[in-house]
Amino acid sequence: MALELPDFPWDALVPSGDIARRHPDGIVDLSVGSPVDPTPELVREALAAATDAHSYPATAGSPALREAITEWYLRRRGVSLGVANVLPTIGSKELVAWMPVLLGLGAGDVVVHPTVAYPTYAVGAAIAGATPLASDDPAEWPAATKLIWLNSPGNPDGHVDSVEVLAAAVARARELGAVIVNDECYAELNWTPGEDGLIETAPSILDPRVIGDSRRLVLSVYSLSKQSNLAGYRAGFVAGCSELIAELLTARKHAGLMPPAPVQHAMIAALGDDAHVAVQRERYRARREMLLSALEGAGFRIDESGAGLYLWATRDEDAWQTVAALAELGILVAPGSFYGDAGARHVRFALTATDERIAAAAQRLAHLSKA
């Protein structure tokens, strides 16, 4: 008996990629948000120093790693946690996909996710036999809801939920007795100034302004893939309600889901250094400005996109029509329909390409505006 899962969406993009690769100056692949910049040297050195990893690593994470995670939440997110509130994961995607299973959800249970969303939220519900529901309105969340996924800053559209929006979602989750989780991995890549003109990290669901004095049934999921170029390391973590963390830890122990010891050591180095994050953020800021200007010059409208690694763009036509036109210019992007029906007239441009490739895309987009 096979799981009833949707087709893997990226397979449908292969023909467009083939067309884009025929461009005389090569493809500019802006479809997948996979980092292209080097992993910071201090992280690589930490990994190398820990390669004598003959013993099984701790599923809960080493004491030093758990302390590093709590210190990072306090320093960068304004959230005070203890080591019982944090747990390292093998990247964040595996946790997203397996969360419904690890929480014991199944038939009859509803898993809510955003209407424009990374598809793994719905896939995780399907793996567990639960029912996914795309909804951004807490008033629509039914009594059978057991798990609510938020994603702020969002992929693909880069929206940022305010403290007030997050608090309203948490309040509804508490009415339902449901677990609520915010996938926050783009929080350091915020491009929108606040009322004081300064740019800060996007709000965390664990912010006291959101949850008050109780973390019960509330979790924050994070990944170092984007801010530290550690996608190949699979370095993530989850934080929040200690009861849920303990439940997840027990299940993960049974399943053998333990981050490798060298990766745990490298995570400590990455979490303790803010300088490399600032450098990487500046790289993405410059690429974003160049691509944003070129897209607007080519007649695109940019919606949301206040944070994260993507520009959510539309020419007010079917997404696949836009994909085809860009492929002829050697530019590959992701159709918004990969992220739900609400994205069917948008495409997602990733900033995860070299400066040279972003500049090439900008030059090619000028020809699109003349077409």
Image: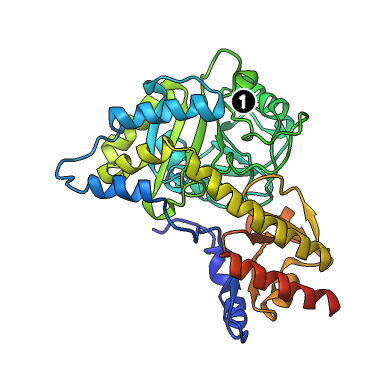
- For the rendered model, the colour scheme is rainbow
Picture coordinates of residue 350, whole percent (x, y): 62, 60
Q: Is residue 192 left or right of residue 150?
A: right
Picture coordinates of residue 193, whole percent (x, y): 73, 37
Q: What residue is at 67 percent from the left and 77 percent from the top?
A: 327
Residue closer to the observer: 366 or 237: 366
Q: Amino acid at mark 1?
A: Ala
Residue closer to the observer: 240 or 129: 240
Q: What residue is at 74 percent from the left and 53 percent from the top?
A: 342
Picture coordinates of residue 35, whole percent (x, y): 50, 58
Picture coordinates of residue 338, whole percent (x, y): 63, 60
Quadrant (top left, top right, bottom left, bottom right) of the N terminus:
bottom left
Residue closer to the observer: 146 or 239: 239
Quadrant (top left, top right, bottom left, bottom right) of the C terminus:
bottom right
Q: Which residue is mark 1?
A: 173
Decide if residue 76 is in sight here.
yes
